[in-house]
Image (cartoon, grey):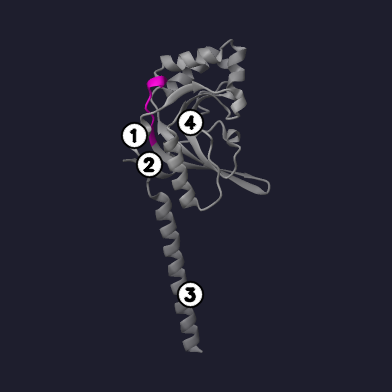
Amino acid sequence: MRKLALRAVVTMAVLGGLGVLFVRSARDVRATPYTVSRDQLTRWTLALEPASAGSGRLLSLSADPMLSGGLFKQIFARAGESMSAPAIGAIPLVLTSEFDLAKAAGLTPEALLQMARAAGLDQARPVPVCVALKRVSEPGITRQAYVVLFTLPGFDEFRRQVAARLGASSGFDASAQSPVALVAATDDAFERWLPVRADAAECTAPIAVE
């Protein structure tokens, strides 16, 4: 009986140790930096998007398709679950829902585009910081989305300028949207995630530029 009890204790200890190693290994994999090519960060397009596109973005900075596509593949390989990728990887500057507020103040999409150019966003070169995970629990389902957080000079100032033009009574929240791009989600309703507010505290892994 003593031998059986000792054997059971040893077995439990071994299984417990293996479990700890497995969890630690999984965490290490998730925390490993994602990689992007430096060339993929040189091509950005400032443009208005038609409402018919259904992206939820009115004005955005679109990335090189290779950038968002490459990160999606890396995220998919780590997550090991079914996910969708947006048609265009882009950093929203003004959302379609926010434009309803802008119209009330007499601002046109073209005026917003001109403001973005004046802020230097047409020449901007966003720098990726990390991949962050957003999660929303709903009845019967948990939705997840992966976003890339960027440093983007001029982004915050531009949104503050839009808020100033609209006035305090408009309800436009300059800080509601962070300089992020949605790259993967467990559903394809990407517009439902907007606006996205994220910071470095939500990062799951950094991004290394090679």
Residue at which label 2 appears: 207
Residue at which label 3 appears: 12
Residue 172 in picture, x, y percent from top left: 56, 21
Residue 39: mark in rendering: 1
Mark whose residue sits in front, 1 or 2:
1
Residue at which label 4 appears: 90
Vertical relation: 209 (above or below) 123: below
**Quarter holding residue 138:** top right
Is disc 1 in contact with disc 2, using a CB cutoff of under 8 Å?
A: no
Range drawn in magenta: 121-128
Residue 28 in picture, x, y percent from top left: 40, 54
Mark whose residue sits in front, 4 or 2:
4
Is 130 a magenta residue?
A: no
Residue 146 in picture, x, y percent from top left: 50, 42
**Element type at marker 4?**
strand
**Element type at marker 2?**
strand
The tag earlier along the polypeptide, 3 or 1, is 3
Amino acid at pointer 2: Ile
Whole-angstrom CA distance, mark 1 to mark 4, is: 17 Å
The tag earlier along the polypeptide, 4 or 2, is 4
Q: Nearer the viewer, residue 51 or 30?
A: 51
Is disc 1 in contact with disc 4, using a CB cutoff of under 8 Å?
A: no
Residue 72 in picture, x, y percent from top left: 47, 43
Viewport quadrant of the C terminus: top left
Q: Residues within 10 Å of mark 1 (few under 14, many from 20)?
A: few
Mark whose residue sits in front, 1 or 4:
1
Amino acid at pointer 1: Asp
Q: Nearer the viewer, residue 4 or 131?
A: 131
Amino acid at pointer 3: Met
Mark whose residue sits in front, 3 or 4:
4
